[in-house]
Amino acid sequence: MGKCCSLWVHFFFLLWCTAKAWSQQRDPSQVPCFFIFGDSLVDNGNNNGILTLARANYMPYGVDFPSGTTGRFTNGRTFVDILAQLLGFDSYIPPFASARGRQLLRGVNYASGAAGIRDETGNNLGDHMAMNQQVENFARTVEVLRRFFRGDSNSLNAYLSKCIFYVGMGSNDYLNNYFMPDFYSTHSDFTPQAYAAALLKDYLQQLTNLHGLGARKIVVTSVGQIGCIPYELARYNGNDSKCNEEINNAITIFNSGLKRLVDQFNKGQLPGSKFVYLDSFASSKDLVANARRYGFEVVDKGCCGVGKNNGQITCLPLQQACDDRSKYIFWDAFHPTEVANILLAKKAFSSTSKVFAYPINIQQLAML
């Protein structure tokens, strides 16, 4: 009798181990889902079907991406594509424009080229989904997800609390708003300090709304060195610095305020949440400063573009891009190459330096 019982215990133990192994093989991701909010740095096709100049659904965009042109504003994978892989997802997070059904359980990318914190940002380029609209789209997704949990809000909230939420906003609020005085009045209406404060006030509300919809593990990114991108270098005639430091200085005010906001959130302002601040300004500066070590040879020109620094006009349809993309930090007038995105994503995911990811990195956030 004891031997028989022992055999049954052994049988069920093997069955449990097999089921567990099959489960892990079937869903290797470290978190159940990944939701993405942002602009063209992470847009993966949401702008393809709308009336806008902020589109990338033509060659040579996607020249190095497995499925070719998709609407990603680079030659290959974006920053969040690589983060999704590092998090263990076996496929990329789908754009809101095409995500349907059970796909939503793995996450959605709501990012839209030209989008900003302010609703009017990017209007000079045409239609887009600003941050407020992206949060509304997530609210719609939550209502669909509620059906998969049979209306059980507690189970849905428990599920969402394990997911990673990436939010990268602010670049266009400077590039396609504050420093475009011919189209917008913000530069004359606000000092750099007052504008940063206004942006942060709106951003605080948007992040609070995301928290109210169930977000708990939230990654926010600072604005990168916009004063050093090919688009700005092609327009800048200053003598003191190669980059436009007026733009970089204004961005630094916003970034400092955003980091303080993250500290407030992590001290209990949004209960149960954990925020990570990614310093895109520092990480992009590091790429340029240590370009040779990373294998880059060209730090101030787009691989694809027209005019000075390949930045006066961004990459045009069917234009011939550079042959060796791995030598370039910038793909076009605005966006990094896939190789640069890989380096930036790896820093954000596993860097032990609080300079790039603060107070913890994304890998540590996923494990909480």
Image (cartoon, rainbow, N blue to C red):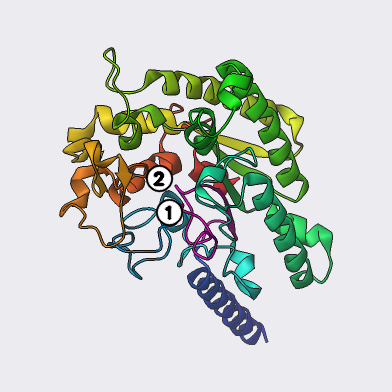
Magenta stretch: includes residue 19: no
Residue 355: horizontal and vertical position, in percent? 43, 26
- Identify which residue, 251 or 9, lies in the foreground: 251
Q: Is residue 165 placed above or below 290 in the rendered structure?
A: below
Q: Main secondary structure of the magenta part?
A: loop
Q: Quadrant of the C terminus?
A: top right
Residue located at (34% from left, 34% from top): 229
Furthest-front residue in this view: 182
Q: Are marks 2 and 1 in contact (CB under 8 Å)?
A: yes
Considering the numbered disc 1 on the image, is that residue within a helix, a strand or a loop? helix
Residue 294: horizontal and vertical position, in percent? 22, 38
| Residue beneath disc 1 | 86
| Residue beneath disc 2 | 345
In which image quadrant can residue 273 be found? top right
Residue located at (59% from left, 27% from top): 185
- Identify which residue, 210 or 171, lies in the foreground: 171
Between the C-alphas of marks 2 and 1, the distance is 9 Å
Q: Earlier in the sequence, mark 2 or mark 1?
A: 1
Residue bounds of the magenta highlight: 29-54
